[in-house]
Image (cartoon, helix red, strand yellow):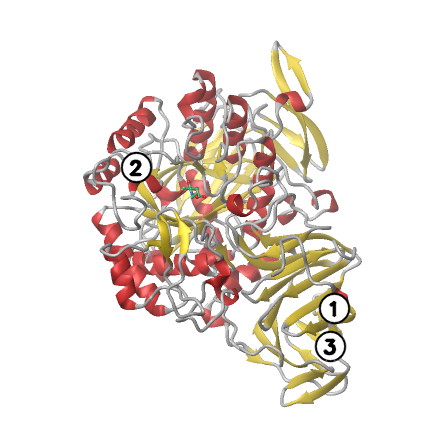
Amino acid sequence: MMLFGQKLHPRNFEHGSRLSRRNGSIEVTARTFKVRITCDEITPACTRLRFDNSNVADKRNYSDGVVENLRAGKSVPVGKGTPTFSTSACDIEVGASRLGIRLKNGMVLETAEDGFGFNGAQSLFNFSVPDASGFYGFGERTKRFNKTGDSLDFYNVDVCAVFPHTFQRDDYDPAYVAIPFAIVRTGAGYVGLYLDNPERLVFDVGHIQPGHLMLQSLAGNNDLYILSGPTLRDVVRNFATLTGRADVPPLWSLGYHQCRWGYKTAAEFRALRENFEKFDIPVSALWFDIDYMDEYRVFTWDRVDLPDPAKLNRELKSAGIRAVTIVDPGVKLEQGYPIYESGTKSGIFCKTASGRDYVGRVWPGDTVFPDFATKAARDWWAGHFAKFIKDAALDGVWLDMNDPATGWSATEDMRFECGTVAHGAYHNQYGHLMAKASWQALRKLDRNARPFLLTRSGFAGTQRYSAIWTGDNVSNWEHLRMSIPCTINLGLSGVAFNGPDVGGFCGHTDEELITRWYQAGFLFPFFRNHTTAHTKEQEPWNFGPQCLARIRDAIHTRYRLMPYLYNCFFAHHLTGDPVLRPLLYDFDSPAFENLDDEFMVGDSILMAPIVERADAGRSVVMHGVRRQQRHVALPDGWWFDLRAGEWIPGGRTILCSACLDEVPIFIRDGSIIPYFNGKFRNGDMTLTKIELHTFIKERDAQLDYYIEDQKTRQYLKGSYNTARIRAGNADGETRIVIDEEGRYATGTVEFAPVIYGSEPSRAVLEHNGVRRSRRLQNSTRRWVSTDVSVQA
Ligand code: MIG
């Protein structure tokens, strides 16, 4: 067994010595192996190389990473002369021990001499990338944004259990989610490599050998997908197409979520609802952690503490609050427990080599595990799952412990497909397949609804079924800081809908940390406060009135920006663009290669939150108020500083200062931000009256705003409109023109302009040909912190 932190030594591999052509494939032979290489064009921007190693006994690729309709591809013949595969995207020259990939967009990616080889069933691909300066993606990761110099393990773990002494640090590896996708930035552009193999892998990013990217697999055959750039956006979109762009989530799930391990009784949930109302904080969902169950038996309720969950959940829903429960995969091994007996009867639990049901040791004690690799188990699960959701009037489910966590029982003893397949082929996909089965259950319950699932573990493509939260973090500044690159890299790896536990899960948070965490996190795609049992209460009102006001500000701003956020998710569904992005995504420059304490939300909002304790960083006292300083790198163009209410020129790094009330936010010149200015009703929002917050300095502004029912799956059949919104300033007047097109009813949304930072006397708004004009006063709204003036 290979330990974490270890990898495969390149010298332990043999390389091919002979090469021959054989019916459309290239065969590489050596003393210890024979490998057949074939090539498929998957899309014009995506090419697959398939390696079939004679030492790999089981030829099946068990991965569910690629969407089903892109698994076949068009077989590419071997060209004459030097053995080459030529596709629309690239020419791939294959040698006995090296690969040369020449992309049509000019980029070149080559292995080193003796750049690929095999050691029994292990594989090594060693790319020489001397001029690469950035490596991104890789799924869920700790540390920094740019992975240059790191070594990354792909083997999902329950972090706290596996790294008990180091999980408080910000550099453990691996984490809960394995997505074997590398994005390489070179001077000439970007290229993506996806190694579609669910077995344990290591990607060594210049740690063993600077200037090299080594992809290593411990078992199984490899499909290597090459995703063309040349831009980062191209690579990310291509990967999202290959592994699936997420459906649009239900609107409520983009709101604020409140959770804690320890909520137990119906009275506590009612008190939460009342407190949110009393403290004027909208909340879209309350979450039930494991204490709701009857002694941790899955699909049961503790009827003493929660005598009528359906009634409670309906009551919450009538206040606009949704209910989500945790569900763990482990089923208590106990005669007489109906779920256990039903699973045993159906024979759907994972087996050991000895043919017995595999037993782990988790919350309920001895537990067995559904074999989500089989359709029979997924169907079995979906049946019980759907019934549970329906009976308890739940709105969504939180899938935990699916890494899978098996406590002190050796995880590798768990086998799949009735014991015929060893653990490795499905380990990294256990959470993914649990999410798939659960998603199918929710779809079956209501064909026209949008399931909401949140999972801890996942694999490439999990976004097709579920959002992901980044697991058990810690209430410390390192974890706050790390949450930014972690969410960015997950987003680049296809999982747009993700985020950390705000406030931190393990340990006690304090007033300053939680304030800064809300301010950094309130526009993260997933936004939930969660903490572990026996920590300080972490709901917004537990830190004094000033802190409450700051947190309220951040949460209110999220709800105000809900039309913008929702639109980002809709755009993700159409394009694959992440919601939260590195600056590199829209502004390619070496200056942003390592920048990970700033990020963009969509195309328009740049956030540079304070992620250091005041005592640790620089600060100044101005007008008697302590203001913390930080550098903010601004891309070229003009940026509207929302706090100062003024335009500032970019293309430079500025020193910014912010007191505890403030978070530095900048809006890109040429932006239109759709904004909700109505009354809050928790997760129930009707976005039919939208303000268009318009920021124009030198660039005309534009926005494609999607209009549909925000509830059902009809948009998937084309039932949505695109409102093309264009705005410009001329003759002291801001002119906004909106043209809706599409198959949804037109005119269901009413727009009103709010103009920032310039002083036009009038705004003219033309919507579907109807003109209205309004006299305006100059308007400056500070989103986070007090509104200073809003006039339209
Ligand atoms: O062994 O359900 O990551 O969010 O509160 C811990 C209890 C199990 C781990 C999850 C965490 C959750 C906790 N769970």
Whether residue 743 can be seen here = no
Classify residue 102 by image quadrant.
bottom right
Residue 93 is tagged as 3
The residue pinned by badge 2 equals: 321
**Residue 127 vs residue 591, the one in the foreground:** 127
Residues under numbered marks 1 and 3 in contact, where contact means CB atoms less than 8 Å apart: no
Element under label 1?
Answer: helix
Crowd around label 2: few <14 · some 14–19 · many ≥20 (10 Å) = many
Residue at image point 70% right, 75% down: 91
Q: Is residue 226 above or below residue 531?
A: below
Residue picked out by circle 1: 12
Q: Quadrant of residue 43?
A: bottom right
All told, the count of numbered labels is 3
Judge depth for marks 2 and 1 and give the one in front. 1
Q: Amino acid at mark 2?
A: Ile
Q: Nearer the viewer, mark 1 or mark 3?
A: 1
- The answer as to whether callout 3 falls within 8 Å of ligand 1 is no
Q: Position of residue 294 (x, y in %)?
A: 27, 44
Residue drawn at 55 percent across, 21 percent down: 660
Q: Quadrant of ligand 1?
A: top left
x, y percent for residue 24: 63, 87
Q: CA distance from mark 3 to mark 2?
A: 58 Å
Picture coordinates of residue 120, whole percent (x, y)? 66, 74
Q: Amino acid at mark 3?
A: Glu
Left or right: residue 638 compared with residue 405: right
Q: CA distance from mark 1 to mark 3?
A: 25 Å
Q: Amino acid at mark 1?
A: Asn
Horizontal relation, residue 573 to residue 758: left or right: left
312 is higher (above) or lower (below) than 107: above
